Every structure is written in C-alpha cells, then in structure tokens.
Amino acid sequence: MRNFCISFNTINQSKKEDDRQELPEKYAAEIETILGTKTIVEKFKKALKADNVESSISELPNEVPDALVKGLIEFVSKHDKDEIIAVLNKELDE
C-alpha cells in the first residue's frame, strides 16, 4: 500500500515539492474506510512518512485483522493496473 500511495502521488502530483508520502487525495476516503479505525489510519499515515522500510514497519500495528489485509490487497489489485502500471507503460511507449 505504501508503494501504491507513493507511486500514485509521484505520477499525479504536478508540483515537485508536493509530499508524495501521503494518502492520495483521490482514494483517501476509501483507504481510510478499509483501514477502519482512526488509530490505524494515523499509524498508517506515520508509516508513509517513514524514511525507510524498517521505520515504516515499526509504525504499523503489530497485528491487524485479516479483513483489513484482504481489503488492502483488493484495493491495490483493483487500482494498481490502471492508475500506475498503465500510465507508466504509456509513458514508456511514448
């Protein structure tokens, strides 16, 4: 999910100084619904801001419900192809 957010923002934010380590505005509400509680949303937002993978992992809860994991996987599977892969492939073709 972290890679999706950063990749999506890199592709879609027009200003170089925009923060790419945040929930994409277009999908923030959907992602927050999947994450469920305000506490998990805040932990996830902190994980997005981390400097490296280890720091990111340390911000996340030790355990999350299976439904949350399934929801995040379904979200990325649903949007990754059209929002990131197709855009990058188009740019490569051009």
Image (spheres, helix red, strand yellow):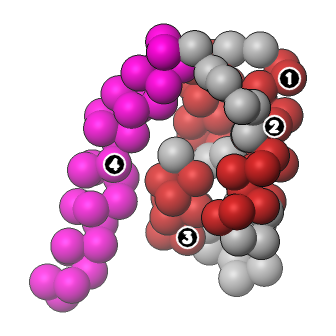
* Residue 80 tag number: 4
What is the magenta range?
A: 66-94
Query: Of marks 1 and 4, which one's residue comes earlier in the chain?
Result: 1
Nearest to viewer (mark 3 / mark 2): 2
- Residue 39 occupies quadrant: top right
Residue at the far front: name it.
62
Magenta span contains residue 52: no
Q: Label 2 near label 3: C-beta < 8 Å?
A: no
- Camera-side residue of 52 and 63: 63
Identify the residue under disc 1.
39
Count of residue discs:
4
Other-residue count near label 4 (Cα within 10 Å), few / some / many at <14 / 14–19 / ≥20: some
* Residue 10 tag number: 3
For the residue marked with disc 1, what is the amino acid?
Thr
- Residue 14 occupies quadrant: bottom right
Task: Give the distance between the C-alpha atoms of the residues marked 2 and 1, in whole angstroms.
Answer: 6 Å
SS of the residue at dot 1? helix
Query: Relative to residue 94, is residue 59 drawn left or right?
Result: right
